[in-house]
Image: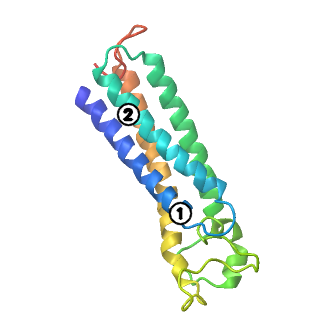
Amino acid sequence: MKSIVLGARLAQGLTAAIVLGLSSIALKRQHFGAEPAATGFSAFVGGLGILAAAVGIIAIFVHAVPDIVVTVADVFTVVCFVIAGIILSVKMSGLNCANDFTKDYDLRHAKAWALFDGGENEYGDIFCPNAAGCDDYSFLRPRCNAITADAAFLWFTFLASIAAAVIAWRLRKRGTTSRSSAA
């Protein structure tokens, strides 16, 4: 039974690491203005997911970890992932990364663009990594794909966290200081 819990915790940790990585890349690409709060929260939640997975893995092997510690970590992680997933999904709603990027498209999807456009300078221009070839905004397509993948992996990690929490809860030993997540 330990291997089932360990597999669920590893899946939780791996998907959380992907969320942290994608969110960090999006934050790193912000050149003008403050980083979007939704992306920063996604990075925080990715780190939290890694921490919760680590606590769950440690609880498999260390008898002194109380069930309540793992349960609280799991509940807090699941709640944070659902909040981050909803926020990012709402901001990305209606955005299609396959569409041509134009200034008109920017105006209609301003909330989503703010997540990956690199910010606007004092003249209202978005950051362009190379001076030539920035008129068509095609350089934003990979950034759009990355933030879309970030939103998707938030939901994958949410599901992995729920699965890990449910499996750990079902297999826990009864008692106040028993090994959580191990049967």
**Of the residues shown, which amino acid type is indicated by label 1?**
Lys
| Mark 1 Cα-neighbour bin, 10 Å: few <14, some 14–19, many ≥20 | few
Q: Residue, x 41% and y 29% (percent of image)?
A: 166
Q: Position of residue 53 (x, y in %)?
A: 39, 35
The numbered dot on residue 154 is none
Earlier along the polypeptide chain: callout 2 or callout 1? 1
Element carrying mark 1? helix
Q: Which residue is mark 2?
A: 54
Q: Position of residue 134 (x, y in %)?
A: 58, 87
Q: Nearer the viewer, residue 55 or 87?
A: 55
Which quarter of the figure has residue 105?
A: bottom right
Q: Nearer the viewer, residue 124 or 183?
A: 124
Q: Is residue 153 above or below residue 134?
A: above
**What quarter of the picture does the C terminus occupy?**
top left
State if disc 1 and disc 2 touch (CB < 8 Å).
Answer: no
Q: Residue, x 42% and y 15% (percent of image)?
A: 66
Q: Is residue 8 above or below residue 135?
A: above
Q: Position of residue 125 (x, y in %)?
A: 70, 80
- Which is closer to the viewer, label 2 or label 1? 1
**What quarter of the picture does the N terminus occupy?**
top left
Q: Position of residue 48 (x, y in %)?
A: 49, 39
**Of the residues shown, which amino acid type is indicated by label 2?**
Ala
Q: Is residue 40 above or below residue 1?
A: below
Which quarter of the figure has residue 2?
A: top left
The numbered dot on residue 28 is 1
Element carrying mark 2? helix
Q: Is residue 93 above or below residue 174?
A: below
Mark 2–mark 1 Cα distance, whole angstroms, equals: 26 Å
Which quarter of the figure has residue 102?
A: bottom right
